[in-house]
């Protein structure tokens, strides 16, 4: 694919599309002013035309202009994310449709908590959620009873928190329902249960499949709605609300149900730190977040199998298993297909849990696997466009997304939208009814029968109380301009995957070129468009000395707030490989490949070298213009030429410090 497909998509590394950007922006801002003037045009202007001539007005305008000019002057020290010389963190240039949509929506200032204050952008948020649902293979027809639901929180952290809230509600509703029915002297049968709900034990109820829980909830709602006595119906509703874990809290709930142990969550050791935050915010506690051992910086499905065996044998409730689709440090893909198979297997054996995928980084790569009609592309057709992508486990992971319960996706990462635009999608929208929270001054308390009508009171179901509708406009418009399939939006991640494959090939050449002064390798097999590079001075055996050497490189590749950004040739980031995350076998292999003495890999809290882990370079290859076909420039080549020069220079400077 040539870059000509991408030319109109961004403002551009050199501001090449400034005329298009300015023309559309001015046109739409003028349109906003005309809209204001045509809302009851018979009303007189509140600000007289002569106001601009007054000293106070002119002084205010002068102060405002001065502060804004100072702001733009200060912003020149910002990180040049737009440049193909930036290979650092998970951020790049912004797509023009989203940038313009967000900017022109801001003056309208919609609040997507309810349609009373966001009649347009709230519908756009619901549409964007369904666009994301379709991208990952969830049912996205809002007329289906099991249609998916998605919305746009501020980022992956809020989305992960939402997934825990939803899992808690689903797991523990049947237990609360049993208590409420017993208290009210009412029975409720269900075709998948061996006995009426009130006669089932708590362990059985807390492990019911999600679909069964939703059917139970629907049956209970029908029971309440069919109760002729209004007071009796209200008593039933209040009885369930009073028994739910959301009302009682974790401590009181488990005191009432002593046979149940507090739940745990399994997540990979490479999971984002937001999971610790989410566990703390929900009151579950960080100690209940249990690490799944890893193999090659990917969660080990066999290890998870053993953990689930132990949980089943000990009657330990498992609230959720988390898989990561593109780790923050390495871009690696967990075995989502194996996780889905384990969930189905253990569900049949009586251990139920929710399966969530944190695809904050890798979510939009799903466009590469999606046909325009919404079907899944064959692996051979995807692979025909690349050298080795996708490996079979990667393809299987994306194909298995439709079998999960909920997914985090960040449009402000590989969706190329402004920050503050995260994404949460769950497979069945009916589950959101369990999270409903009413406020009479905002919501009327009644649930509309249709999909759009129900979620126009979006604030009832989500973490946020207020949220900008401008982000929803940005996402929805972008997905309309570039639908989320391989032929349209997919051309963007395709360019970045191609860049990652070129980067890997060039890294191997670089390793040969610098072999006389350093050992270089790609320490983690590449799954996506994030590539790490490990470097060790030739002859060095000490982890601490290697880390000092790499730290010198990192200092040259990171932003320096004290110096103009133009002085930097390239930008990259860094991360660290910890032995406990790598595992003994992979750690030993990497140490041997780099020529390091394993005995030097030690924890020394008072030692400045921090030799308990390996410091490595990390490169995020999401700029689609890394290969400039027009001018014949490959910035990947230029980066490695720069890196070779710096490695040779620093090797000479650091030679005396080798161990």
Image (tube, rainbow, N blue to C red):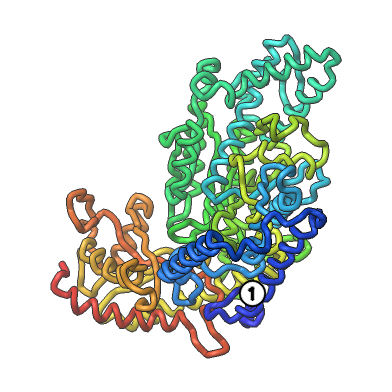
196 over 423 or under it: above or below: above
Query: Residue 145: where, in percent of width, then height?
Result: 80, 41
The residue nearer to you, when weighing 539 against 558, is: 558
Query: Residue 458: where, in percent of width, then height?
Result: 69, 41
Q: Is residue 273 left or right of residue 184?
A: left
The residue nearer to you, when weighing 448 against 268, is: 448
Q: Which element type, helix, strand or loop, lies under badge 1?
A: helix
Query: Residue 521: where, in percent of width, then height?
Result: 36, 71
Q: Residue at x 60, y 34 (%)?
A: 352
Q: Residue at x 79, y 55 (%)?
A: 39
Q: For residue 47, what is the image quadrant?
A: bottom right
Query: Which residue lies most toward the left here?
Result: 656
Residue position for label 1: 21
183 over 129 or under it: above or below: above
The residue nearer to you, when weighing 118 against 324, is: 118
Q: Residue at x 74, y 58 (%)?
A: 36
Query: Residue 103: where, in percent of width, then height?
Result: 63, 62
Q: Quadrant of the N terminus?
A: bottom right
580 over 56 or under it: above or below: above
Q: Residue at x 64, y 74 (%)?
A: 21
Q: Quadrant of the C terminus?
A: bottom left
């Amino acid at each position: 694919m040539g870059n000509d497909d991408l030319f109109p998509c961004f403002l551009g590394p050199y501001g090449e599309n400034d005329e298009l950007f300015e023309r559309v922006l001015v046109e739409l801002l003028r349109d906003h002013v005309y809209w204001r003037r045509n809302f009851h045009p018979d009303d007189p202007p509140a600000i007289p035309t002569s106001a601009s001539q007054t000293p106070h007005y002119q002084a205010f305008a002068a102060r405002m202009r001065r502060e804004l000019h100072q702001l733009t002057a200060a912003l020149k020290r910002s990180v040049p994310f737009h440049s193909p010389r930036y290979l650092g963190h998970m951020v790049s240039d912004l797509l023009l449709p989203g940038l313009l949509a967000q900017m022109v929506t801001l003056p309208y200032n919609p609040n997507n908590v309810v349609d009373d204050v966001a009649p347009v952008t709230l519908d756009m948020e619901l549409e964007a959620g369904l666009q994301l649902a379709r991208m990952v293979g969830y049912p996205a027809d809002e007329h289906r009873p099991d249609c998916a639901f998605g919305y746009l929180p501020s980022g992956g952290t809020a989305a992960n928190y939402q997934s825990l809230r939803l899992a808690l509600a689903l797991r523990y509703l049947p237990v609360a329902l049993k208590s409420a029915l017993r208290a009210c002297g009412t029975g409720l049968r269900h075709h998948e249960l061996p006995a009426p709900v009130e006669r089932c034990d708590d362990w059985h109820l807390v492990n019911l499949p999600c679909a069964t829980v939703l059917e139970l909830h629907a049956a209970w709602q029908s029971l309440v709605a069919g109760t002729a006595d209004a007071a009796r119906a209200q008593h039933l509703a209040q009885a369930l609300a009073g028994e739910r874990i959301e009302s009682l809290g974790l401590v009181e709930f488990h005191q009432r149900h002593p046979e149940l142990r507090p739940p745990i969550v399994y997540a990979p050791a490479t999971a984002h730190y937001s999971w610790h935050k989410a566990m703390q915010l929900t009151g579950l506690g960080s100690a209940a977040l249990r690490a799944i051992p890893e193999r090659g910086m990917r969660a080990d499905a066999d290890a998870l199998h053993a953990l689930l065996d132990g949980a089943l044998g000990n009657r330990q409730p498992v609230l959720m298993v988390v898989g990561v689709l593109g780790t923050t440090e390495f871009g690696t893909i967990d075995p989502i297909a194996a996780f889905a198979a384990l969930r189905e297997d253990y569900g049949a054996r009586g251990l139920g849990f929710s399966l969530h995928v944190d695809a904050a980084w890798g979510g939009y790569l799903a466009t590469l696997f999606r046909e325009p009609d919404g079907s899944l592309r064959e692996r051979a057709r995807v692979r025909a466009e690349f050298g080795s992508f996708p490996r079979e486990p990667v393809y299987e992971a994306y194909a298995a997304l439709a079998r999960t319960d909920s997914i985090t996706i960040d449009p402000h990462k590989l969706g190329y939208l402004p920050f503050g635009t995260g994404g949460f999608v769950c497979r069945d929208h009916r589950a959101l009814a369990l999270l409903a929270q009413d406020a009479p001054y905002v919501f009327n308390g009644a649930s509309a029968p249709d999909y759009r009508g129900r979620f126009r009171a979006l604030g009832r179901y989500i973490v946020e109380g207020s949220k900008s509708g401008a982000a929803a406009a940005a996402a929805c418009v972008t997905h309309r301009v570039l639908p989320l399939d391989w032929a349209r939006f997919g051309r963007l991640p395709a360019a970045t995957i191609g860049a990652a494959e070129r980067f890997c090939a060039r890294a191997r050449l670089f390793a040969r070129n610098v072999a006389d002064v350093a050992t270089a390798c790609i320490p983690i097999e590449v799954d996506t468009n994030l590539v790490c590079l490990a470097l060790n001075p030739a002859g060095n055996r000490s982890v601490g000395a290697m880390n000092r050497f790499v730290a010198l490189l990192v200092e040259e590749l990171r932003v320096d707030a004290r110096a103009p950004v133009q002085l930097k040739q390239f930008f990259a980031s860094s991360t660290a490989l910890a032995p406990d995350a790598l595992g003994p076998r992979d750690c030993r292999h990497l140490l041997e490949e780099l020529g390091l003495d394993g005995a030097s890999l030690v924890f020394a809290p008072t030692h400045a070298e921090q030799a308990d882990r390996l410091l490595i370079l990390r490169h995020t290859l999401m700029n689609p213009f890394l290969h400039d076909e027009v001018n014949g420039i490959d910035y990947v080549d230029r980066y490695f030429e720069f890196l070779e020069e710096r490695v040779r220079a620093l090797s000479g400077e650091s030679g005396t410090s080798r161990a």
